[in-house]
Image (tube, rainbow, N blue to C red):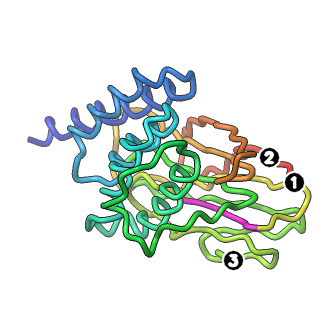
Amino acid sequence: LSLVGSEMCIRDRLLRTLAHRLQQLKKYDLAICIFKDVLKIREEEPQSYRDLGLIYAENRQYQEAVDNLCKVINNKWDGRFPEIELICIGEVNRIIALSTKPLDLKNFDNQFQKNLPVDIRVVIGWDSDNCDMDLWVTDPTGEKTYYSSPKSQIGGRISRDFTGGYGPEEFVIKNAMTGNYLVEVDYFGSSRQTISGPTTVQAKLIAHFGSKKEKTKEITIRLKQAKEVIQVGNLYF
């Protein structure tokens, strides 16, 4: 049973990495098929529904996107995924704002239906379960926002810290100061031994999130060892 579990974990990770790579190459139909396979393997994890919902959104299948993200919002999940539903609420509202057709929102509570665009959004996820990863963002004033200092003086905010699961972790700032925002990832390591290779981090650096001016830069990074701080990139606003 242990061997079977390990093989499923390896397959899960490889499929997630492949699907994200296809997503970056804009091979959306193929990526959707693979994320569906991941969901069959890991339907107990909200990240499986979120990944599928977000790729549907990129393929402009907005109803399918909303349906999958609402499953994250409305269900109860393991404590490894603290407040993931709050991140998905923002993502659903963005999709509603982008859609040119009316959407069936019966599964999306009216009290959550309000698009709140932000000047900057940074979000990371990773492919290793039980993995402790921290998002750091240093703003133009030199202040770093991270898990133990989640709110900055100029209005930046970091989401809840994920010490297990696959993320996501998110940084947002509604009214951004002009200047450079340095994005880093601090990799503390995994609580589980793995034979499936280095952890892969998927990062999105987004300007004008939730508006018609939205621009996104996607970055993939392979982390080879624990206790490693990696510079993901810079977002100049």
Against 195, residue 181 (above or below) is: below
| Foreground of the two, 220 or 51 | 51
Q: Earlier in the sequence, mark 2 or mark 1?
A: 1
Residue shown at 30%/65% (left/top)?
74
Q: Earlier in the sequence, mark 3 or mark 1?
A: 3
Q: CA distance from mark 3 to mark 2?
A: 19 Å
Label 2: how many residues lie within 10 Å, few (<14), some (14-19) or many (20+)?
some
Residue shown at 70%/61% (left/top)?
118
Q: Earlier in the sequence, mark 3 or mark 2?
A: 3
- Per the picture, the main secondary structure of the magenta-coloured stretch is strand
| Place of residue 75 in the rendered image (x, y in percent of width and height, measured from the top left) | 26, 64
The quarter of the rendered structure image containing the N terminus is: top left
| Place of residue 69 in the rendered image (x, y in percent of width and height, measured from the top left) | 38, 53
Disc 2 target residue: 234
Disc 1 target residue: 180
- Quick check: 133 left or right of 205? left
Label 1: how many residues lie within 10 Å, few (<14), some (14-19) or many (20+)?
some
Question: Is residue 11 covered in magenta?
Answer: no
- Quick check: 69 left or right of 224? left
| Place of residue 199 in the rendered image (x, y in percent of width and height, measured from the top left) | 48, 40
| Place of residue 162 in the rendered image (x, y in percent of width and height, measured from the top left) | 46, 63
Q: Amino acid at mark 3?
A: Lys
Residue shown at 64%/54% (left/top)?
210
Quarter of image, res 232: top right
Q: Name the secondary structure under disc 3.
A: loop
- Quick check: 37 left or right of 157? left
Q: Amino acid at mark 1?
A: Asn
Disc 3 target residue: 151
Q: Amino acid at mark 2?
A: Asn
Segment tinted magenta in the rendering:
169-174
